[in-house]
Amino acid sequence: AQKITQTQPGMFVQEKEAVTLDCTYDTSDPSYGLFWYKQPSSGEMIFLIYQGSYDQQNATEGRYSLNFQKARKSANLVISASQLGDSAMYFCAMREGTGFQKLVFGTGTRLLVSP
Amino acid sequence: EAGVAQSPRYKIIEKRQSVAFWCNPISGHATLYWYQQILGQGPKLLIQFQNNGVVDDSQLPKDRFSAERLKGVDSTLKIQPAKLEDSAVYLCASLSGRPMNTEAFFGQGTRLTVV
């Protein structure tokens, strides 16, 4: 069963606008962590933001924030004030707390920021 | 702190040949992941090591893929014999420990082309 679902293959946004990238997840483990990574065309995976299942507040890191809705099992990434350099693939990932903490990824969303 | 090192960066082989990839994780990181990322898709976990033991290899095609992590440090991933569908980027990532909010660090990847 797919544990991480990203339903938007591609998103377009104009520079300086905000954009939301969707992510839903599936787990029965009460302890888990959700991660967002950025992958530019150069290929490296860049960690952006983390949200823990027990965190009371939504995570924020600079222009990145995570809209965490635990009951709906969604962890959407919000990028504010988009920049041309934000054009990249974005992956949502989850690590479950029990066992050996397998890290699984979604299929990704390609974001294109236009001037 | 040095990052995750992978080599080679690029490799082109003919189908039915064998190939090996090498990964040197961040010093002290107990968890090591190997992922296969086919163009346009999300990373697919092939195998996870905890120190020098395999904790998950459920998606590793064991008839042709093998991996080892001797002494709990460096790791090699081998494909023998390669098929056309093995063309992908192979990513290695390492993780320091159990706290859920620690992110995995990725290497630059090895881009394999099977012709």
Image (spheres, rainbow, N blue to C red):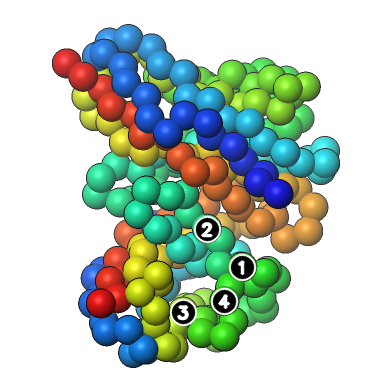
The residue lying at 46 percent from left, 79 percent from top is B77
Q: A25 or B68, which lies in front?
A: A25
Q: Is residue B29 visible?
A: no
Q: CA distance from mark 1 to mark 3?
A: 14 Å
The residue lying at 32 percent from left, 84 percent from top is B15
The spot of residue A103 in percent (x, y) is 61, 52
Marked residue nearer the N-terminal end (3 or 4): 4
Chain to which the residue tagged by mark 4 belongs? B
The spot of residue B50 in percent (x, y) is 65, 70
* Residue B77, numbered circle: 3
Marked residue nearer the N-terminal end (2 or 4): 2
The residue lying at 67 percent from left, 44 percent from top is A3
The spot of residue B82 in percent (x, y) is 39, 82
**Mark 2 Cα within 10 Å, few/some/many (few <14, many 20+)?**
many
* Residue B44, numbered circle: 2
* Residue B61, numbered circle: 4
Q: Are marks 3 and 2 on the same chain?
A: yes
Q: Is residue A9 left or right of residue A106?
A: left
Rendering quarter of residue B46: bottom right
Tell me the amino acid under the disc marked 1: Gln
The residue lying at 32 percent from left, 59 percent from top is B108
**Residue contact between numbered discs 2 and 1, judged by CB atoms under 8 Å:** yes
Rendering quarter of residue A89: top left
Q: Are marks 2 and 4 on the same chain?
A: yes
Tell me the amino acid under the disc marked 3: Leu
Q: CA distance from mark 2 to mark 1?
A: 8 Å
Marked residue nearer the N-terminal end (2 or 1): 2
